[in-house]
């Protein structure tokens, strides 16, 4: 996402800080910001935890650090974490900082597509702090209130607030001009919005807003607006938000031209891109509004072809026939069939029609799974819609797993008791168990795993590898007791020599994490020598190396040294030999230190 203009207005009281202090603070902050911009967001935030001064001790310095921290969190998409941090800091802050926190939370609400939450913060700001507001602060707060009305589609409130503001302020900034234009468009007064353009010809207004004004005021033809919008939407350098807006305009222009397939395809592209960034309600497109756009087109096609309600297959057959020439109209037809079936309580027919819609989408290279995510889930809550068929849930589950979106994968898995096509129950339930463990739903995930372990004592090598992935996840989150118990259970199975050797190693890993070092060293060495009694292959050398480290930690210095020296003789890697020599030297230092501390 683009770097947010999140703190475009900061209270002037903090600008009195000395130049020397600011340069010093900014230098330290800048070094941390580089980490975050380089992708190490968690590391950067940990640096803030380590070096940021306390609010109560150094409030002015804290402010500069906090501003940078919150900006980093917003840029990384940590909206909820930023909100929680600002909220928890508020009670401890002085009045000036409280104003900044409320303003920041309002900006965050707008940034994270929650305008009503932003409005609450701004109203609190005006009610509690307007008496202490600076000359430029109160007008800015009122302008942001107008932004929340715009983002939430509250046209009446927006018009009334603009009229009051025009009486109180002589605003002519670009932001103010943009608000007035958008309010007029939302009030179906495009001619007046065009007059504002003429009144302020040098105002910096987004090109998509300018094009929409010309389209709705009919100062250019619909066909010209359509061509310009399509050309702009396809420009690679544009941000996703702008592209989505231009597709929205193309959809509106093509509707006026009676091009239903082009209209729907443009809406589809706008919706797909809106998964990355949303704009104001003037360009907003929800999944429900897109579905509402599909339905009359699909119903019209059905009427023209005398298709009967309740019989889904003829609708699907006709849609397939249309799919090459008019793909979006084909999608509209099956969704119309789905809607009728849903209203009639025909669940199987509803599922069948929605599944065909999914097949059309997945088969269209211009849409694919990203569009499915827009169409079947809510952007904020990431929850499945009531219309979502099982096949869509499976596609989105796979997409969530591939992108590491564990929260969405977990919510989707709750709807997927039935395995997807070509996938057995064992495989599917194991995947559900893994997602639940990774999402923190440990008890539920382990319960599914235990049930499968009790039912499948003859699992094949592939299935055992899948089981091990769940156990590795348990180890990764630190639940070594749970992992160890299941590893020991697996060893009772009829395993291949390869898997028996691996089980010994992974058990040793958990024992070492549980500080049972002697037991861990025994298993490492058993794993190393399991196949040939020597352990000189790559696996064996790795296991013996871990055994030596564990023995050293357990105080068996001589044993550790013997193993390291054996590995030194066998190794051909220059890097590995250097590491072994260093480890041997460290063992010598440890022994000398122990003898000094305990001369007996």
Image (cartoon, helix red, strand yellow):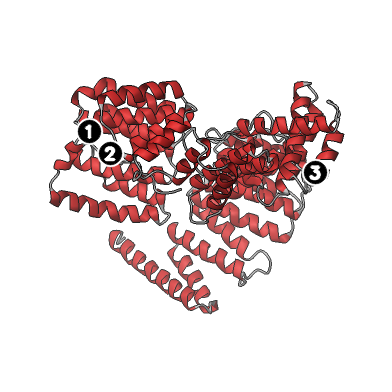
Q: Earlier in the sequence, mark 1 or mark 2?
A: 2
**Identity of the residue drawn at 78% across and 21% down:** 345
Q: Nearer the viewer, residue 484 or 435?
A: 435
Residue 545 place in picture, x, y as percent: 52, 66
Asked if residue 275 shows in the view, the reply is no
Q: CA separation, marks 3 and 2?
A: 53 Å
- Does the CB distance between marks 1 and 3 fall below 8 Å? no
Q: Earlier in the sequence, mark 3 or mark 2?
A: 2
> Mark 3 — residue?
322
Residue found 61% across the figure and 72% down from its top: 536
How far is disc 1 from disc 3 in space, using C-alphas? 59 Å
Q: Which residue is mark 1?
A: 136
Q: Which residue in the structure is indicated by mark 2?
A: 9
How many numbered dots are placed on residues in this image?
3
Compared with 159, 600 (above or below) is below
Q: Please identify, in this view, whether the residue under mark 1 or under mark 3 is nearer the observer.
A: 3
Q: Residue at x 72, y 34 (%)?
A: 389
Q: Are there few (<14), some (14-19), or many (20+) residues within 10 Å of tag 3?
A: some
Label 3, secondary structure: give it. Answer: helix
Q: Which mark is residue 69?
A: none
Picture quarter containing residue 396? top right
């Amino acid at each position: 996402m683009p770097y947010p203009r999140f703190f475009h207005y900061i209270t002037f009281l903090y600008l009195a800080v000395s130049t020397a202090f600011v340069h010093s603070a900014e230098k330290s902050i800048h070094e941390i910001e580089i980490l975050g911009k380089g992708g190490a967001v968690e590391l950067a935030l940990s640096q803030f935890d380590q070096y940021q001064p306390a609010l109560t001790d150094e409030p002015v310095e804290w402010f500069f650090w906090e501003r940078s921290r919150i900006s980093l969190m917003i840029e990384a998409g940590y909206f909820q974490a930023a909100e929680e941090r600002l909220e928890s800091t508020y009670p401890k802050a002085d009045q000036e900082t409280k104003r900044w926190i409320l303003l920041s939370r309002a900006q965050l609400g707008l940034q994270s597509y929650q305008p009503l939450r932003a409005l609450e913060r701004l109203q609190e700001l005006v009610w509690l702090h307007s008496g202490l507001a600076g000359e430029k602060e109160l007008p800015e707060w009122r302008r942001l209130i107008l932004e929340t009305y715009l983002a939430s589609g509250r046209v009446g409130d927006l018009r009334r607030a603009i009229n009051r503001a025009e009486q109180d302020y002589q605003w002519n900034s670009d932001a103010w001009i943009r608000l007035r234009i958008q309010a007029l468009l939302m009030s179906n007064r495009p001619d007046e919005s065009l007059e504002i353009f003429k009144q302020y010809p040098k105002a910096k207004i987004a090109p998509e807003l300018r094009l929409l004004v010309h389209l709705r005021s009919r100062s250019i033809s619909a066909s010209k607006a359509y061509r310009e919008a399509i050309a702009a939407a396809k420009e690679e350098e544009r941000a996703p938000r702008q592209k989505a807006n231009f597709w929205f305009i193309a959809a509106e222009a093509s509707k006026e031209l009676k091009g239903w397939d082009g209209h729907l395809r443009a809406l589809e592209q706008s919706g797909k891109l809106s998964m990355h960034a949303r704009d104001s309600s003037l360009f907003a497109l929800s999944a429900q509004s897109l579905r509402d756009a599909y339905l009359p087109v699909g119903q019209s096609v059905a009427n023209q072809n005398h298709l009967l309600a309740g019989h889904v297959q003829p609708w699907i057959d006709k849609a397939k026939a249309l799919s090459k020439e008019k793909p979006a109209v084909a999608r509209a037809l099956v969704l119309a069939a789905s809607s009728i079936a849903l209203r009639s309580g025909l669940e199987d027919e509803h599922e069948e029609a929605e599944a065909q819609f999914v097949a059309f989408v997945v088969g269209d290279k211009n849409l694919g799974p990203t569009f499915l995510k827009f169409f079947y889930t809510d952007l904020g809550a990431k929850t499945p819609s009531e219309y979502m068929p099982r096949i869509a849930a499976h596609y989105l589950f796979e997409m969530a797993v591939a992108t590491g979106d564990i929260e969405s994968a977990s919510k989707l898995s709750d709807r997927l008791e039935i395995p997807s096509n070509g996938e057995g129950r064992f495989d599917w339930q194991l995947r559900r168990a893994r997602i639940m463990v990774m999402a923190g739903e440990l008890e539920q995930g382990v319960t599914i795993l235990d049930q499968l372990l009790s039912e499948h004592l003859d699992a094949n090598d592939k299935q055992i590898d899948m089981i091990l992935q769940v156990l590795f996840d348990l180890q990764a989150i630190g639940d070594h007791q749970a992992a160890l118990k299941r590893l020991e259970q697996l060893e009772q199975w009829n395993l291949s020599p390869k898997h028996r050797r691996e089980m010994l190693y992974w058990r040793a890993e958990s024992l070492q994490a549980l500080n049972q070092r002697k037991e861990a060293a025994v298993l490492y060495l058993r794993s190393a020598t399991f196949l040939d009694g020597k352990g000189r292959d790559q696996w064996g050398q790795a296991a013996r190396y871990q055994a030596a480290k564990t023995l050293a930690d357990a105080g068996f210095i001589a044993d550790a040294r013997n193993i390291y020296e054996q590995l030194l003789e066998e190794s051909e890697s220059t890097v590995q030999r250097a590491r072994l020599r260093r480890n041997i030297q460290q063992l010598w230092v440890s022994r000398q230190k122990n003898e000094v501390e305990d001369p007996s």
